[in-house]
Image: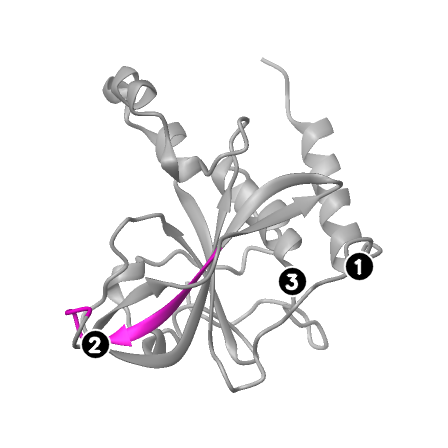
Amino acid sequence: MSGSTNLPPGFHFFPSDEELVIHFLRRKASLLPCRPDIVPTLPLNRYDPWELNGKALNAGNQWYFFSQATQTRTSRNGHWNPIGADESVSSGGSNVGLKKTFIFSIGQEPFQATKTNWVMHEYHLLDGNGSSSTSGNSRKRSQKKKCHSDKESSSNWVVCRVFESGCNSQVSFQEEDMELSCLDEVFLSLDDYDEVSLPKN
């Protein structure tokens, strides 16, 4: 899938942190269709941030894509370094996700790398215990080793927002009691439709 959108003219992809986690990442991890299906899946370590244009979903000066969580966020010409503290993503008063922030540095050696203005927000789902789903329990992993399949790998999905700082592309959503946007209402109605239309086994 290319980075071009399939949205009608006049519609723009401008999601909040909550919308990215609830309407996109949670559906991706649950193996449910994302509507609209416009966010592609990319391997994070295959591309440098300036190579995302035409591959990831481009929305203004930001690029969005799904990827599998990994401990080493390296590419051909550099790596992503974590900065700052992880931030909780909440919905309806409950923590539903985690936002990690990274900055891209050119070069593979930490002490010789050159920092750039490229920033990445990486969103994770939280499991039932309030911890990141990517940190999994080792005992559970060993028990499920024989069925290392879609269900287990789906918990490792993340959604990424990449932008170059200084390009007025970073978005902040600080209002906790923000009313539902039109995008929220549309997606919530689609979620309800899926729940009532799925056949019972």
Q: Nearer the viewer, residue 26 or 109?
A: 109
Asked whether residue 105 is drawn in magenta, I would say yes
What is the number of the mark on residue 181? 1
Residue 146 at x, y = what percent?
Answer: 24, 18
Q: How is the image coloured?
A: one colour
- Cα–Cα span, label 3 and label 1: 10 Å
Q: To which quarter of the image does residue 73 belong?
A: bottom left
Where is residue 175 drawn, in percent x and y?
77, 60
Amino acid type of disc 2?
Ala
Which residue is the site of mark 3?
15
* Span colored in magenta: 100-110
Q: Name the residue type under label 1.
A: Ser
First in sequence, mark 1 or 2: give its number: 2
Magenta segment, principal secondary structure?
A: strand
Q: Sort mark 1 into few (<14), some (14-19) or many (20+) by Cα contacts within 10 Å.
A: few
Task: Estimate the spatial distance between the alpha carbons at disc 1 and disc 2, rounded to whole Å.
Answer: 41 Å
In the depicted structure, whether residue 129 falls above or below residue 11: above
Give the residue pinned by disc 2: 113
Sequence-earlier tag: 3 or 1: 3
Q: Is residue 86 visible?
A: yes
Q: Quadrant of the C terminus?
A: top right
Q: Nearer the viewer, mark 1 or mark 2?
A: 2
User: SS at mark 3?
Assistant: loop
* Residue 193 placement, left or right of 167: right
